[in-house]
Structure formats: structure tokens, C-alpha cells
């Protein structure tokens, strides 16, 4: 496996948030219950939620944590992703550390899909790769 590039703060636009629940590095997160809070993607993919960003380090509930909200971030893929693919949040996992991972979606994005961004490199299953963050919720197409 090739060496993964290190991400520096110069490559990501970051913000400091409070973890509503425990979060883990490289996890996509959604807005929390209060202002300036983030939390893991929940069961059912937090339907209709917009991704707030990608956590840069592990944090316990009520800890401050840096979150990439733009630019580049490392994300974990649950299946192989090809460079240039649109990536979305993958299905919820019963293993907390595995929530907020990404998967490829180059078909017509389903309404409500939580789009994370575009893969900038090929990413193997259960590996980490570089993503250009373009977080949004896919709207209906006419």
C-alpha cells in the first residue's frame, strides 16, 4: 500500500467545536444539539442532515476538537473509491469508531444523500484517503 500524505492545517479550513459525544479522527460529523457542537452520524445516516466536517483527532464528549470544514481531509472508506468519485457518508455502523466513513456514489445521487466531497486519490476498502470537502445534502433533481 502506498504511503498516505499527511494533512496539515494549511490544507484544511478548520473550526473548533465541542464534541456532544465521543468522536474519532477522520470521522464525518453532523451538527450537534447546541451551537458549536458536533456529533457522530447516527443510525440511519442522520437522514437529511448536512455534514458539518471531518474530525481531525479523537475527542471525548464535552471536549474541544478541531474539525475540517473545508479544504482537504483524510477520510476512511468502507469500500473502494476511485480518484474523482463523489463520496457520501456510508451506512451507519454499530461500531462507533467506524461511523462517519465514506463510500463512492457516482450514480445519480439520491435526494437527501449526505455528500462529503470528491476523492483526490484511489482509496482501498477500509483505508484512508484524501478528500476535497464539498459538504452538502443532495437536493431533488427536476
Image (cartoon, rainbow, N blue to C red):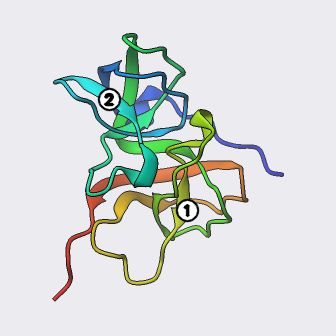
Dot 2 or dot 1, earlier in sequence: 2
Pick the quarter of the image with the C terminus: bottom left
Position of 97 with respect to 110 (left or right) is right
Residue 128 or residue 132, whichever sits in front: 128
How many discs mark residues in the rendered view? 2
Question: Which residue is nearer to you in this view: 129 or 20?
Answer: 20
Image position, residue 138 (x, y; %): 27, 68
Give the residue drawn at x 42%, y 43%.
42
Q: In 3D space, how far apart are the residues under numbered discs 2 and 1 (Cα atoms)?
A: 21 Å
Which residue in the rendered view is the most extreme toward the top?
63
For disc 2, the marked residue is 38
Measuring from the top left, give residue 60's x and y in whole percent. 48, 14
Q: Is residue 32 left or right of residue 90?
A: left
Question: Is 104 or 4 nearer to us in this picture?
Answer: 104
Residue at figure coordinates x 35%, y 21% from the top left: 20
Query: Which SS class for mark 2?
Result: strand
Q: Nearer the viewer, residue 13 or 97?
A: 97
Dot 2 crowding, Cα within 10 Å, few <14, some 14–19, many 20+ = many
Label 1 SS: strand
* Residue at the far bottom in the pictured view: 142
Taking the image as shown, residue 33 lies to the left or right of residue 60, namely left
Q: Circle 1 sits on which residue?
A: 103
The image quadrant of residue 110 is bottom left
Amino acid at each position: 500500500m502506498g504511503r498516505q500524505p499527511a494533512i496539515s492545517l494549511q490544507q484544511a479550513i478548520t473550526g473548533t467545536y465541542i464534541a456532544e459525544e465521543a468522536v474519532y479522527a477522520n470521522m464525518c460529523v453532523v451538527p450537534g444539539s447546541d451551537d458549536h457542537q458536533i456529533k457522530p452520524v447516527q443510525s440511519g445516516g442522520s437522514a437529511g442532515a448536512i455534514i458539518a466536517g471531518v474530525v481531525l483527532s479523537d475527542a471525548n464528549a464535552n471536549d474541544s476538537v478541531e474539525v475540517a470544514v473545508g479544504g482537504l481531509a483524510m477520510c476512511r472508506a468502507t469500500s473502494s473509491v476511485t480518484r474523482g468519485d463523489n463520496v457520501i457518508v456510508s451506512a451507519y455502523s454499530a461500531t462507533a469508531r467506524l461511523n462517519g466513513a465514506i463510500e463512492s456514489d457516482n450514480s445519480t445521487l439520491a435526494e437527501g444523500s449526505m455528500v462529503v466531497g470528491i476523492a483526490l486519490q484511489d482509496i482501498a476498502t477500509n483505508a484512508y484517503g484524501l478528500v476535497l470537502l464539498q459538504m452538502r445534502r443532495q437536493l431533488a433533481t427536476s
